[in-house]
Image: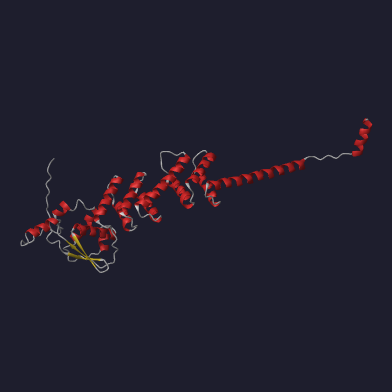
Amino acid sequence: MKTLTLKNKFQTNATLLPNDFIDHYMADANGEFVKVYLFLLRHLDDPCSSITISTIADCLNNTEKDILRAFRYWESAGLLALERDSDGRVTGLELRKTMSAEKESASDKSAPAAVTGTADMKKAVPLENKAVPLDAFRTQKELKSLLFIAEQYLGKTLTRTDVDTITYFYDTLHMSADLIEYLIETCVENGHKSMHYIQKVAFSWVEEGIQTVSQAKEQSMIYSRNCYAVLNAFGIKNRGPAASELTYIKKWAEEYGFSSDIIQEACRRTITATHQPSFEYADSILTRWHQNNVRHLADITALDDAFQKEKNAGRAVSRSRTAVKNMNNFERRSYDMDALEEQLLNSN
């Protein structure tokens, strides 16, 4: 393969980037974090530059939380020192030397620093004092591990939206890394790799107060048991419930509080009546049972008996009315009793 020759014909108005950064830091960093670092490096020697977290976010088309996460990443990597006020708000930044530059300085402290882009990096970049929330992952190692695992489950490189969504689970919804990992694993195993779907499940877990993996597993078992029972009763094989079907199942199990045997009975009656799966028809049955405070199969039997008695009573009333109507419609005849008696005597 032919070797490429790189030529540089301009040097003015340029930002110098240490080779050590490219060799040892850039590959492991998120692309958005690299953009933030380069932005800071570009404004390092600009005396007229006055930047804020909001300014950086606007210039890089990011959120302020994204910028803060990048700050914390480079702080954990040793390339940045954050200055904070008493309230924990970031007020300034100090860019640090890379590992190679630090080693060179330690080995030859008497030697004058060369202008290579690393010697002048230890400067402060003032930031406007602005209240910014500092919620973040407990450690950068946990973040990198979680994102790596998510990529393995989803089978793709995470987009910025994916990263923001996963970060949102931890940062705002306060889900642990283990719970987020189990969330993604469960959704993928059920055939859902869409981050939008994963987010909906995360919201439902938060609403249900699920905070640990064990709680999520218990809820997942209940979900699987209910779904399997309904699909099996309907004779549906080789697929999971559709979104609309799942809404019905959750309604029956959670809102109505019906046990699996009651739901299956409604499904069996649906098949008997319609000869095909119908979640709408089953819902009408279960809604009627809910309105009649059904809690056990015995309650259904009692309800059926009462309905049958009422039906039989209705039929009896109907037959009685029909008989009376027929009698009323019978043509009445009048007889001359004296003439009949005379006719009888004459015949003798």
Does residue 301 appear to the left or right of 97 in the view shown?
right
Please give the name of the residue rendered at 65% of the width and 43% of the height, measured from the top-left corner: 312
Q: Looking at the image, is 279 positioned above or below residue 172?
A: above
**Residue at 40% across, 53% down:** 204
The image position of residue 74, as x and y in percent, is 21, 58
Front in this rendered view, residue 293 or 27: 293
> Which quarter of the figure is the C terminus placed in?
top right
Residue 136 percent across, percent down from the top left? 28, 59
Please name whichever residue, 156 or 224, is drawn nearer the observer in this view of the structure: 224
The residue lying furthest to the bottom in this view is: 86
- Report the side of 327 relative to 120 (left or right): right
The image quarter containing residue 60 is bottom left
What residue occupies the far left of the structure in this picture? 110
Quadrant position of the N terminus in the picture: top left
Pinpoint residue 8: horizontal percent, then vertical percent.
Answer: 12, 52
Q: Is residue 247 above or below residue 95?
A: above
Where 17 sits versus 312, above or below? below
